[in-house]
Amino acid sequence: MLPQDDSPSTGLGNAVDDYLTAHGYTADARRAIVCAWKQNENQDGFAGYLCGKGMAKSEAKWLWRFINSDHETNSDSESS
């Protein structure tokens, strides 16, 4: 049987968690992403934080947009 990921939810949305799981992000990497999200109000700050941890800038910027799009989708469905 293939190993199962038992990393806790990031709180950033199911789609984000599914993406991180599918791409093999570790629990430590997930914590860094959550920390970057909580500490930065813009894409440049978020990407800069994660680049300092070794993530490619293009990936960090894509992840920022992905998290934001998931949050906007969840906000829209909650207000309906």
Image (spheres, rainbow, N blue to C red):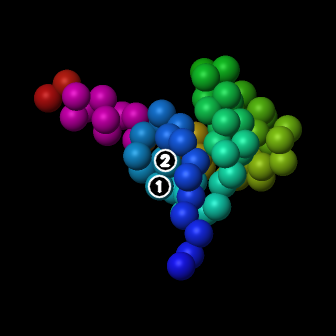
Label 2 secondary element = helix
Residue type for callout 1 = Asp
Q: Which residues are magenta?
A: 70-78
Asked whether, in this view, residue 39 is left or right of residue 78, the answer is right
Picture coordinates of residue 69, whole percent (x, y): 42, 41
Report if the CB atoms under discs 2 and 1 are less than 8 Å apart: yes
Assess disc 1: are there few (<14), some (14-19) or many (≥20) residues with their C-alpha within 10 Å of its C-alpha: few
Which residue occupies 19% across, 24% down?
A: 79
Residue 47 visible to an observer of this rendering? no
In the image shown, does 39 or 45 lie closer to the viewer?
A: 39
In the image shown, does 74 or 14 lie closer to the viewer?
A: 14
Query: Relative to 52, is 23 above or below?
Result: below
**Dominant secondary-structure state across the stretch colored magenta:** helix
Residue type for callout 2 = Val
Q: Which residue is mark 1?
A: 18
| C-alpha gap between disc 2 and disc 1 | 5 Å
Quarter of the picture holding the C terminus: top left
Picture coordinates of residue 76, whole percent (x, y): 25, 32
Q: Residue extending furthest bottom?
A: 1
Picture coordinates of residue 30, whole percent (x, y): 64, 42
Asked whether, in this view, residue 24 is left or right of residue 22, the answer is right
Which residue occupies 56% across, 52% down?
A: 6
Which residue occupies 31% across, 39% down?
A: 73
Q: Which residue is mark 2?
A: 16
Residue 75 visible to an observer of this rendering? yes
